[in-house]
Amino acid sequence: MPFLGQDWRSPGWSWIKTEDGWKRIELYGNELGDNNNGIDLEDKVNLSLCFLSSLFQVVYQEKWIYVQKESTRERHGYCTLGEAFNRLDFSSATQDIQRFTYVAKLLQLIARSQLPSLSGAAQKNYFNVLEKIVRKVLEDYHNPRLIKELLQDLSSTLCILTRGMGKSVLVGNINIWVCRLETILNWQQQLNNLQIPKQLSNGMTLRDLPLDMQNNILYKFSDACDIINLGQATPTLHMLSEDRHLWKKLCQFHFAEKQFCRHLILSERGHVDWKVMYFTLQKYYPKREQYGDTLHFCRHCSILFWKDCHLALLFKDSGHPCTANDPDNCLVPVSPQHFIDLFKF
């Protein structure tokens, strides 16, 4: 019978017994085409089931990977960063607005320190995902500042690493990396020349909203640059963006109270200057990361996966083949840095 489960110990290929012995079933091959007359009805049914199973596996691509750091009886070797990057379908995640920032941040961390650890296939997949991100920004004008920072870090890292190609610090031919660097520089130029068109609308705009609603919108921002940029839109928003209580909330969101005491900054009136404190604190401490959707790690079965909330509600599917009684209690959100740390052996 064909293997239809989602267990990570899949037997692999589907096989069928013929008069000439066991033969592997190929989805698009004609290996059994000459022997159809010698196969009985039961074997033909099994063949059809195997074909449907293979077709299901092609259409439904798994978006999870078993993270192992040592050999087991069922699996030998260990999982690498490049293998995880290939299996977790980051290409589709770039089209999801909830996952876009997460994937971009992960690409940035890999660009800073993990490029030499990527295999040739993982490198190709990395730059394919990066190309889709750049195209999305150029078409939809979505978060160009983040992608500019990503490309800047990537080009700086490549400039340093390509000078040391004699030490074999990068996998691949030097000419391939030079071409990739030229492509990155071209993307940077396109983003620098990007002109976001002015939206012409006869309906209600942001300035037409009541003052308290505009203020509530500013309080939803977790990035200081977004607050400053929005404050430049209208004089009213500029006044609201300079509110000291707004910057106090932002400091409390990103930093701990004990960090305030070490870098206390007072204004001329003796009040705490929370805006100056924010930009001072970010020089010394990392900011709190916030993403619409993240990868999850199951502590019970050591599987890293994307959790599809819609499928979880419709089919009570946890998103991975978990054997725990309550899979949701075993899940841990994985930040981009945690993702990198999972593959440091």
Image (cartoon, rainbow, N blue to C red):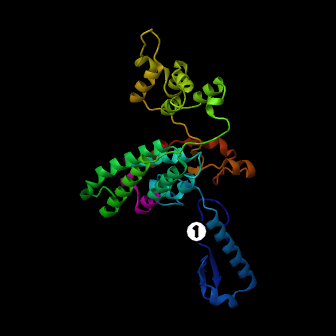
Looking at the picture, tell me which residue is in the foreground, 272 or 300.
272
Looking at the picture, tell me which residue is in the foreground, 38 or 247.
247
Instruction: Let me know if residue 114 is in the magenta part.
Output: yes
Identify the residue at the far left of this view: 166
Residue occupying the point 70% across, 87% down: 39
Q: Report the number of numbered marks.
A: 1
Q: Residues within 10 Å of mark 1 (few under 14, many from 20)?
A: few
Image x and y of residue 166, in percent = 24, 58
- Above-or-below relation of 262 to 23: above
Check disc 1 and give the amino acid type: Gly
Looking at the rendering, the stretch of residues picked out in magenta corresponds to: 112-125
Q: Main secondary structure of the magenta part?
A: helix
Image x and y of residue 245, in percent = 55, 19
- Could you tell me if residue 345 is visible in this image? no
Looking at the picture, tell me which residue is in the foreground, 207 or 216.
207
Image x and y of residue 178, in percent = 32, 59
Residue occupying the point 56% across, 32% down: 221
User: Is 169 on the left or on the right of 23, as rendered?
Assistant: left
Image x and y of residue 72, in percent = 51, 57
Name the residue that disc number 1 marks.
Answer: 12
- Could you tell me if residue 233 is visible in this image? yes
Looking at the picture, tell me which residue is in the foreground, 172 or 150.
150
Residue occupying the point 30% across, 55% down: 169
Q: In which quadrant of the rendered view does residue 165 lie?
A: bottom left
**Quadrant location, the N terminus:** bottom right
Helix, strand or loop at mark 1:
loop
- Above-or-below relation of 151 to 244: below
Instruction: Let me know if residue 48 is in the magenta part.
Output: no
User: Is 177 on the left or on the right of 232, as rendered?
Assistant: left
